[in-house]
Image (cartoon, rainbow, N blue to C red):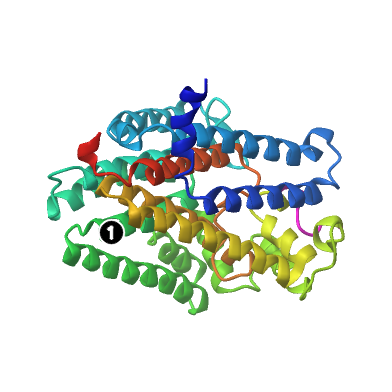
């Protein structure tokens, strides 16, 4: 028995200890403030969301340690199968998927769009990191096609937030793999210009002296759906539609700003307690608003520090890896988590449009939580097996 466990213990000693500490801390913080956010809800099942969050988090963390013992190279080499399964699930969503909160995103109780994030990162890590991989324009367009197909299916649900985080993740992996640098920077510049033009068009339509018909024509030219246009309008003009599309944003800003240095105290947040911040969003997309109001600046900085520790440890594992597949997987995962955290926190304080992206390990969301824990289990596998060259296996 001792001989059987010895190799396992030897491998587990090679995991990065900062990653599970940060994940466990963020998960517990999430459970604490989900309990706070749901404490005023009448449905007993909704009041127990914090228990589900903690159960999924702790169970998933144990599963991630088990996955860490599997050589990540074997899994990445089967990434095409994972990618095809994710693609198949995304195709089924508009056919037999379940509609909730205005979007048809659920299938068999899960959100395929969340699982697809991991599938896409795995596929790109294999494509760009395998031996003899092309580093020119061909690889760039192959990768773009692999991202564009699931992104289009996700955008059709509609889920603009998930589509947006795939873009920086893709470009970060391109830069890390040194794929056609001139082409990558050219597309980045074009993307920035297009984004600026899109916001400029909406701004001109609002501020210009146009007839309603002309204004509608200008907004249709953006190619965005009406609800997406409204979110950008609220972002550019915070006082527009304060009782409609801009309501959650304004209440979130009040909650964050009123927290002060140390917060109002646990279970004493007035914005959600009095119902100004809707219960339907306070436990997921706007959980940071609840945390900032009750724990203040000190609590917010604590959470940001944990995220920075998680990102630093992830990139450190990637840098120590001896092969490109492991390095690229680490870069892709770190970028995905950074984008989620940055966009979610920025939207709660009015610095980004409302997109509906969860805050990693803190917002309530089963599919996203499990997907992230599996992804970090693979990253720990990179920490264990990536220290040796690929030829040893």
Q: Is residue 3 above or below residue 9?
A: above
Q: Residue furthest top?
A: 1
Q: Which residue is drawn at 38% across and 38% down?
A: 119
Q: In this view, does 209 lie above or below 265?
A: below
Identify the residue at image location x=31%, y=58%.
171
Magenta extent: 274-280
Q: Is residue 277 magenta?
A: yes
Residue at horizontal 51 percent and vertical 79 percent from the top: 207
Answer with left or right where residue 307 lies relative to residue 3.
right
Give the quadrant of the C terminus.
top left
Place of residue 264 in the rendered image (x, y in percent of width and height, measured from the top left): 84, 67
Q: Is 321 included in the stretch rendered in magenta?
A: no
Q: Nearer the viewer, residue 357 or 121?
A: 121
Q: Position of residue 204 (x, y in %)?
A: 45, 76
Residue wearing tag 1: 176
Residue 218 image position (x, y, % from top left): 41, 66
Nearer the observer, 281 or 13? 13
Q: Position of residue 377 (x, y in %)?
A: 47, 40
The reply, left or right, for residue 340 in relation to residue 282 is left
């Amino acid at each position: 028995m001792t001989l059987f466990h010895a190799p396992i213990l030897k491998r587990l000693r090679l995991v990065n200890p900062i990653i599970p500490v940060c994940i466990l801390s963020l998960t517990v913080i999430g459970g604490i403030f989900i309990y706070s956010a749901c404490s005023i809800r009448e449905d007993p099942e909704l009041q127990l969301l914090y228990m589900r969050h903690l159960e999924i988090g702790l169970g998933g963390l144990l599963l991630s340690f088990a996955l860490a013992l599997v050589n990540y190279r074997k899994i990445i080499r089967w990434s095409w199968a994972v990618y095809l399964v994710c693609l198949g699930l995304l195709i089924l969503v508009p056919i037999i998927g379940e509609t909730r909160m205005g979007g048809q995103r659920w299938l068999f109780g899960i959100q395929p769009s969340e699982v697809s994030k991991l599938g896409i990162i795995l596929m790109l890590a294999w494509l760009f990191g395998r031996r003899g991989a092309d580093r020119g324009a061909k690889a760039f367009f192959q990768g773009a096609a692999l991202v564009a197909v699931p992104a289009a299916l996700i955008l059709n649900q509609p889920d603009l937030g998930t589509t947006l985080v795939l873009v920086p993740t893709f470009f970060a992996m391109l830069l890390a793999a040194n794929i056609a640098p001139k082409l990558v920077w050219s597309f980045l510049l074009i993307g920035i210009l297009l984004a600026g033009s899109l916001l400029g068009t909406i701004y001109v339509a609002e501020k210009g002296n146009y007839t309603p018909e002309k204004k509608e024509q200008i907004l249709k030219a953006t190619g965005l759906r009406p609800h997406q246009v409204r979110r950008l309008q609220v972002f550019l003009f915070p006082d527009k539609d304060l009782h409609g599309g801009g309501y959650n944003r304004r209440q979130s800003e009040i909650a964050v700003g009123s927290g002060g240095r140390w917060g109002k105290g646990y279970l004493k947040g007035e914005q959600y307690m009095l119902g100004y911040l809707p219960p339907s969003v306070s436990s997921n997309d706007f959980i940071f608003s609840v945390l900032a109001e009750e724990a203040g600046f000190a609590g917010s900085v604590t959470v940001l520090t944990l995220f920075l520790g998680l990102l630093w440890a992830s990139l450190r594992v990637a840098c120590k890896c001896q092969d490109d597949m492991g390095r690229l997987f680490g870069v892709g995962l770190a970028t995905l988590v950074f984008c989620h955290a940055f966009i979610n926190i920025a939207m709660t304080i009015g610095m980004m449009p409302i997109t509906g992206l969860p805050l990693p390990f803190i917002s309530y969301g089963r599919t996203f939580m499990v997907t992230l824990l599996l992804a970090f289990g693979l990253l720990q596998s990179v920490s264990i097996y990536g220290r040796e060259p690929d030829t040893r296996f």
